[in-house]
Amino acid sequence: MENNKNIKKIFLHDVHLSLNARMIPFAGFYMPVRYTSDMEEHITVRTSVGVFDVSHMGEFVIEGPQAIALLQKITTNDVSRLTIGKAQYSCMTNARGGIIDDIVLYRTSEHSYMMVVNASNIDKDWNWIQMHNTEGATLKNISDSICLFAVQGPNAKHCMQKLIKENLDQISYYSFIQTELAGVPDILLSNTGYTGSGGYEVYVSNENALYIWQAIMNAGSEYGIKPIGLGARDTLRLEMGYCLYGNDIDETTTPIEAGLGWITKLNKSFIGHEVCIEQKNNGVSKKLCGFVMAERGIPRSGYKIMNRDAQQIGIVTSGTQSPSLAKGIGMGYINTEHAIPDKDIYIQIRDVLIKAFVVKPPFYKK
Amino acid sequence: MNFPADLKYSKDHEWIRVEGGMATVGITEFAQKELGDIVYVDVNTIGKELSQNDVFGVIEAVKTVSDLFLPAGGKILEVNPELNAHPELVNTDPYGKGWIIKIQLNNTDELHTLLDAAAYKEMIGK
């Protein structure tokens, strides 16, 4: 599907090659999928600390007195509640309520925001925002000049504390600082991540990226820090039940169907608002659910979800063998009447129906 | 990477070790490396007569699912009982404790269509 000629390299591509990464095309970039073993990398993040280079992600700066009005219009969460130094998980939806992307919005000053978007959606999102910018906010796409490193795991705090003067205990979940890291100015450091093991995300301009990568690796060496690939990133996020755009959410699914009602504020107006209200009031026909295999079997995206009478009631959108639980886990859209915790469902795996139970994620609890 | 000289190899990255009319089949070191951590080996063809290149089972890594192809036709006699609890043996010892099935060969002439270690290495560019 992907045309290899158009696939971009992330800024530290050669560093990953020298670390024996296996690079695969993902979302338009060659990305490290694995350095040693998915399992080992997964356990490293759960038990100590690992670092992901997720520089493929996109960053847009949205500025000016009109920025908030634009953002209120195009995102589902309430931007008026986002204070300076805080981050907010949100969605952009189209007029049908379909999810254009799931994003994280940072408020960096009174009239300045940074929106972090999925790599596969950079062009689509950028066009969408430009098209809807009737407010006249100032827009900048800085995706190609920024690297993003996610330092994740129970020892991430000890590792990062060595590199900054501020006390990391003061940086609560979904907060951030703009600071000097390892002597490098203009770093954005946030208490965020996509693993469920805690940690920080570091936004750094390309010219300082190699230095910061090495500083993080050196600071983490006493904790056995390792580079972590997208393979483990996927099993880590799935154990938490976090959505992956393109798998669990896309333009055919709404935030209400996807269980993202908590970031969809219906007391404000936004594109797709009417559909979300209608679904909230009248209910939805399908819901994104988590499930755990009751018997041996590994669910995979696209597998059918059946009821006891072998009638299809849904479809799997993500699945794997959970390294922490040593069981098959997955997520998928299930017809609402079957989308009930503890309900027995059946996953069709190679013509055999294997029993599973609907559960409310996270699958992994600390 | 290690490719023992006493084995024959298929283009689908299985190896076969022949002992009389019987043979043991597994996947190569190259294949296990490509797949990553093996978490499940699913063989539901025990007792069946299959032809060369037929699918005899499925191997699942954390990220991928791959069919297993029979390098030579025969009857599937046994699946490695250790793999149920320890599928990672395919990663750690692909030619030894990580063997996958034993078969009764139908026609040993089919073995001539397989690659030797040198030809297999060349095919995968190692």
Image (spheres, helix red, strand yellow):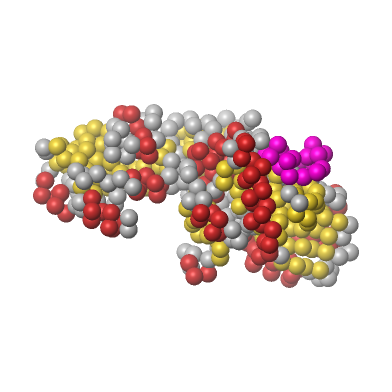
Q: Residue at x 46, y 33 (%)?
A: A355
* Residue A274 in picture, x, y percent from top left: 75, 56
Task: Please state the extent of the stretch shown in magenta in the rendering.
Answer: A156-174
Residue A168 on the magenta span: yes
Compared across the picture, whether A163 is left or right of B39 comes to: right
Above or below, A189 against A131 in this view is: above
* Residue A271 in picture, x, y percent from top left: 75, 60
Give the number of marks: 0
Residue A256 in view: no
Residue A203 on the magenta span: no
Compared across the picture, whether B34 is left or right of B101 comes to: right
Compared across the picture, whether A1 is left or right of A131 comes to: left
Q: Residue at x 56, y 51 (%)?
A: A247
Q: Residue at x 55, y 55 (%)?
A: A15
Compared across the picture, whether A218 is left or right of A186 comes to: left
**In terms of depth relative to the viewer, which is nearer, A112 or B17?**
B17
Q: Residue at x 64, y 30 (%)?
A: A366
**In terms of depth relative to the viewer, which is nearer, A98 or A65?**
A65
Quadrant of the image occupied by residue A350: top left
Residue A207 in view: yes
* Residue A76 in picture, x, y percent from top left: 75, 53
